[in-house]
Image (cartoon, rainbow, N blue to C red):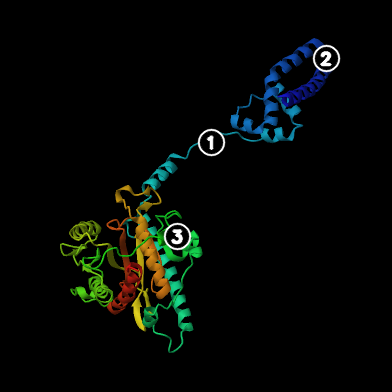
């Protein structure tokens, strides 16, 4: 305020000087001194408020701009003040600016914004005129990009392996049976790096996420995934939420050439080669009234599996065996023991949405155990069958993985694989399962 007062005092003296010239002008015109002095006093009295405003505008332009006080009429005292304040450049700049009040968006723009919010999840395709879920479209595009990236990495790895192979190299099956490591064993130091673990072993769907608290290698690898009971009672349940999934050369009406037939072959290997007591449930949940209908498949499957578990409480491991869906020019295949073998992918549901957080109506108390099983299997694949398994896929929902701690969803191959490639994949898959599940 002292600074403001000094400016005002200086301006007053400037005005008095100007008024002196004004009085002199009166004398030249032959007017009386008293009349001139009276006019000057009137000007000073009227200018007091204008002086305060002018000084404030010069010293505090921001406040003056916001206040936006309208100018007074162009009187003589205003003219004098403006001339006196003209020696301050900032005042001259502010005085030349147009003060205005901000307004909200126009009514039309506002309606567009409101409509945009309403159509956030459901958009209209301009070409077809049909509504589509934009979130699903983004998810599909992200999944396609992730798959293409994964396929490129796997193709590069296969090429590198092919370059390093020589004639007469030890057969993969013999090497695996002898315990020889053909791939990579990762150290705990590497796996304890959250970014390393997440980026190298997982694909995280765009509408979900996972934290280092949940994806903790030391915790997950420390969980005991081995069988706690012998094979005197059922130990493993294999079923298919999507039993109608077929392959490029599947025979219509022949279940042995669909994912069901592939599941039966896996069950046979687990029984005959590794001695597990396995139930293979071949019930159908995605074919309703003669038509493919997957809207209620997981719900129907859950009720059936719950009944099987109630009748066989000894079951410790549940495997929901699927095949993936990819673009028609994608072929998920590698070579194991000289045979074309479909690649597979382990899959976890996190019951977590980026937008809303934990999905309460899809509670799963076994998310940690589910993650432990898939990670231990993935690392076993990297150790014994490099290039066979794709990255573990993390999605937002639950997918009936809450029914047992050791619940697993496997996406084996895709619709572009042959039945032979799929059957060939079950042999290494059974071996990997045994590596993780067998009692020491």
Up-down: is 203 above or below 356?
A: below
The location of residue 172, given as percent across then percent down, is: 39, 81
| Circle 3: element type | helix
Q: CA distance from mark 1 to mark 2?
A: 53 Å
Q: Quadrant of residue 55?
A: top right
Q: Residues within 10 Å of mark 2 (few under 14, many from 20)?
A: few
- Would residue 108 be visible to someone looking at this image? yes
- Left or right of residue 155: residue 60: right
Residue 250 picture location, percent across and down: 24, 76
Asked if residue 265 lies left or right of residue 15, the reply is: left
Q: Between 243 and 363, which is closer to the camera in this rendering?
A: 363
Q: Is residue 63 left or right of residue 357?
A: right
Secondary element at image label 2: loop
Residue 148 occupies which quadrant of the picture?
A: bottom left
**Residue corresponding to mark 3:** 218
State whether residue 385 appears in this view.
no
* Residue behind mark 2: 30
Give the Cα distance between marks 2 and 3.
104 Å
Q: Nearer the viewer, mark 1 or mark 2?
A: 1
Nearer to the camera, 399 or 275: 275
Residue 102's tag is 1
Q: Earlier in the sequence, mark 1 or mark 2?
A: 2
Q: What residue appears at the point 67 percent right and 29 percent down from the top-left corner?
A: 57
Q: Disc 2 or 3, which lies upstream in sequence? A: 2
């Amino acid at each position: 305020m002292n600074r403001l007062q000094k400016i005002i005092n200086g301006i007053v003296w400037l005005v008095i000087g100007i008024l002196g010239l004004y009085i002199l002008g009166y004398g030249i015109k032959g007017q009386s001194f008293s009349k001139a002095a009276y006019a000057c006093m009137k000007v000073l009295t009227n200018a007091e408020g204008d002086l305060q405003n002018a000084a404030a505008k010069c010293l505090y332009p921001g406040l003056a701009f916001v206040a936006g006080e309208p100018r007074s009429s162009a009187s003589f005292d205003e003219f004098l003040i403006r001339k006196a304040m003209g020696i301050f450049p900032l005042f001259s700049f502010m005085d030349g600016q147009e003060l205005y009040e901000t307004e909200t968006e126009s009514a039309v723009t506002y309606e567009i914004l409101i409509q945009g919010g309403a159509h956030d999840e459901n958009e209209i395709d301009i070409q077809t005129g049909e509504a589509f879920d934009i979130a699903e479209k983004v998810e599909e595009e992200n999944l396609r990009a992730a798959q293409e990236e994964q396929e490129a990495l796997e193709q590069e790895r296969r090429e590198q392996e092919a370059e390093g192979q020589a004639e007469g190299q030890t057969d993969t099956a013999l090497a695996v049976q002898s315990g020889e490591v053909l791939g990579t064993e990762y150290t705990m130091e590497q796996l304890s790096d959250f970014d390393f673990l997440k980026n190298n072993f997982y694909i995280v769907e765009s509408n979900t996420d996972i934290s280092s608290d949940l994806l903790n290698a030391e915790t997950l690898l420390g969980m005991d995934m081995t069988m706690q009971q012998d094979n005197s009672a059922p130990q493993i349940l294999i079923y298919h939420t999507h039993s109608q999934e077929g392959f490029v050369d599947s025979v219509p009406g022949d279940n042995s050439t669909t994912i069901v037939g592939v599941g039966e072959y896996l069950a046979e290997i687990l029984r005959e080669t590794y001695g597990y007591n396995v139930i293979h449930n071949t019930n159908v949940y995605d074919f309703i009234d003669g038509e493919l209908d997957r809207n209620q498949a997981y719900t129907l499957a859950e009720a059936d599996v719950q009944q099987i578990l109630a009748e066989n409480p000894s079951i410790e491991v549940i495997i929901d065996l699927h095949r993936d869906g990819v673009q028609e020019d994608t072929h998920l295949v590698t070579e194991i023991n000289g045979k074309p073998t479909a690649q597979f992918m382990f899959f976890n549901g996190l019951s977590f949405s980026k937008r809303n957080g934990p999905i309460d109506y899809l509670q799963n108390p076994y998310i940690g155990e589910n993650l432990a099983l898939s990670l231990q299997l993935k690392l076993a694949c990297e150790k014994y069958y490099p290039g066979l398994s794709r990255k573990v896929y993390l999605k937002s929902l639950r997918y009936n993985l809450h029914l047992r701690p050791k619940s697993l969803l496997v996406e084996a191959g895709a619709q572009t694989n042959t039945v032979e490639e799929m059957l060939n994949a079950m042999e290494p898959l059974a071996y990997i399962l045994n590596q993780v599940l067998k009692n020491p």
